[in-house]
Image (tube, grey):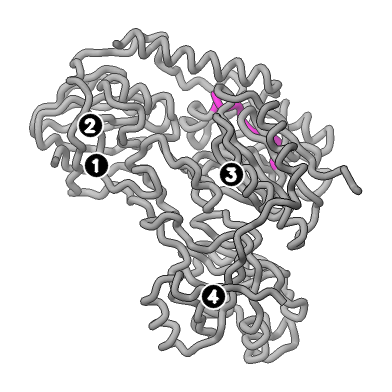
Amino acid sequence: MDDTYPIIRPVGEDSILVEYEEEVSLEVNRKARQLAFGLEQASCPGLEEVIPTYRSVVVYFDPLRVDSEVVRGLIEEVNAHLVEIELPSPRLFRIPTVYNRTHGPDLDRVAEYTGLTPDEVIQLFSVHAYPVYCLGFICSLAYLGGVPEALHVSRLPTPRPFVPGGSVGFAGPQANILPVDSPSGFNYIGRTFVAVYDPREFPPTPIRPGDYIQCPAVSEGEARMAGEKHLGEFVEGFQST
Amino acid sequence: MKAFRVLNPGIQTTIQDLGRSDMMKYGIPISGATDRRSFLIANLLLRNRDNVAALETTLQGFKLQALRTITISITGADLDPWLNDQPAHQWTAFTMKEDEVLHFRKRRRGLRAYVAVQGGFDVPVMLGSRSTYLRGRIGTLLREGETLNICPSDSEASEEGLTIPQEYRPNFDWTDPIRVLMGPQDDCFTPWGIETFLNSTYRISPQCDRQGFRTEGPTIEIAKGPDIITDPIPPGSIQVPGDGKPIILLRDAQVTGGYAKIAVVARVEMDRLGQVMPGDTIRFQRVDRQTALNLLREEAHHLDELKALLR
């Protein structure tokens, strides 16, 4: 067994970074989520925040309350029993999305780049469910992966200074739904009016790392009607195949 | 309870407390007062609890009128505050009478000043804090004509004239280098790149806000990357994008990102960094973990000492 990973190293004086294999894959991401989940269950005074991302976990602690060696020991202990950690069942969010040139300024660019027609682009993108690797950036952005290779298009050479919240797009294998108006270099092909982020609620998004998101194509009218509803109404249990 | 009217919101004035905890995993930064120590002292002067919300105002122009007689304190940057036609006290609790006007006329030292009031400013608590986080649509910039409410105070009456001794006031001096801990991705840079980082002077660029700032100066040579698989960005991270110029991230910064982080600033330097402004120059100095920890202990001790002194 490869014992190079995880690499555990201090960051500043109040956090520890735990890194699994240097790749974007569900298998490696699962380890990060399992470790984070295990650490959240552990009770350790002075432990403050645990943040899983693609292949790594950062653990924040109060260095005046707990020694970093104690935190490191806890990480090693949880890691040693990683396979036994049961994660919450993944769920599928099916978020109605309107795809057209008005809401998807990059639809033609993607079509040109991939050699597909705009309708084929929409069909191919909207039929798949994409796994949530992690939450982050700003406003609970869900980092989605697994975009089919036929749709791999690089980022815009110059990011757009303004993309409306709810825009649905991708770049390379990654996809996202912008939680709020924001600059972005992704290729946006559609938009949902369902709020994926609401700071008046806790948690500010019901989406969890490990869930799946699909953006089925609907008409503009249906998409706007769906926007009246809460994201929680579009969740289903996920049957993995 | 109505307490103030905003006559001029200034360049940027927001309500802040100590910020959010345990929200980064939901993609929400910690936010809160950029210069935490000055914020804490402002509350200390009024015998408020630590986490009571205050105003953070930037640079100049902020003007507000009292709608009742009220005890306040001003700490942080010296933005030349005046109370009607007299210079106002700083680092000292004082009374503002009904209709009196407080005006921050011109920046003299530092960038962000704090105005605390007994009981604290009353805005809705969102995700566990009253701190404004503009990008996340939590709170807003103060607006002209707006009325500011305060919470009823649950602490004992504050003492007008309570003041912070000179030696406990920060001097906002950047001649001393900013102490940093190397990593977590310093291996993305060449030894020469690390040398450049530690031996150069960097000027704060005009792109400078509560999220952080870019710098201008010698290019840091990159060995690999600098793009990494997106990982968490601790506040105080110094990331280096492809142009080789360090970006320093503060408390409103995005919580994850894909640029290599050459270093993270020592915790005790965060407050000072919250007071730099475009055009200021800074240098970096490497310290080890134990040194950083000792500095942190020293600072905590310093604050305890001050608390005892004011009791």
Check contact, mark 4 vs mark 2: CB within 8 A.
no
Q: Is residue B262 magenta?
A: yes
The residue pinned by badge 3 equals A40
Give the Cα distance between marks 4 and 3. Answer: 25 Å
Report whether mark 4 lies on the same chain as mark 1: no
Residue kind at label 4, given as amino acid type: Glu
Of residues B33 and A231, the one drawn nearer to the viewer in this rendering = A231
Question: Looking at the rendering, which quadrant does residue A172 occupy?
Answer: bottom right
Residue kind at label 3, given as amino acid type: Glu
Provide the chain ID for the residue under circle 3: A
On the image, the x and y values in percent for residue B1 come to 14, 40
Q: Work out whether A117 lies above or below A174.
A: below
Disc 4 element: strand
Give the Cα distance between marks 4 and 2. Answer: 46 Å
The residue pinned by badge 4 equals A236
Q: Which residues are magenta?
A: B261-269
Could you tell me which residue is drawn at 63 percent across and 62 percent down? A210
Provide the chain ID for the residue under circle 1: B
Could you tell me which residue is drawn at 63 percent across and 46 percent down? B232
Residue B111 seen in the current view:
yes
On the image, the x and y values in percent for residue A126 come to 61, 82
Give the Cα distance between marks 4 and 1. Answer: 40 Å
Report whether mark 2 lies on the same chain as mark 3: no
Question: Looking at the rendering, which quadrant does residue B58 occupy?
Answer: top left
The residue pinned by badge 1 equals B122
Residue kind at label 2, given as amino acid type: Gly
Give the Cα distance between marks 2 and 3. Answer: 34 Å
Residue kind at label 1, given as amino acid type: Asp
- How packed is label 3: few (under 14 Cα within 10 Å), some, or many (20 or more)? some
Residue most extreme to the right:
A1
On the image, the x and y values in percent for residue A43 come to 57, 36
Provide the chain ID for the residue under circle 2: B
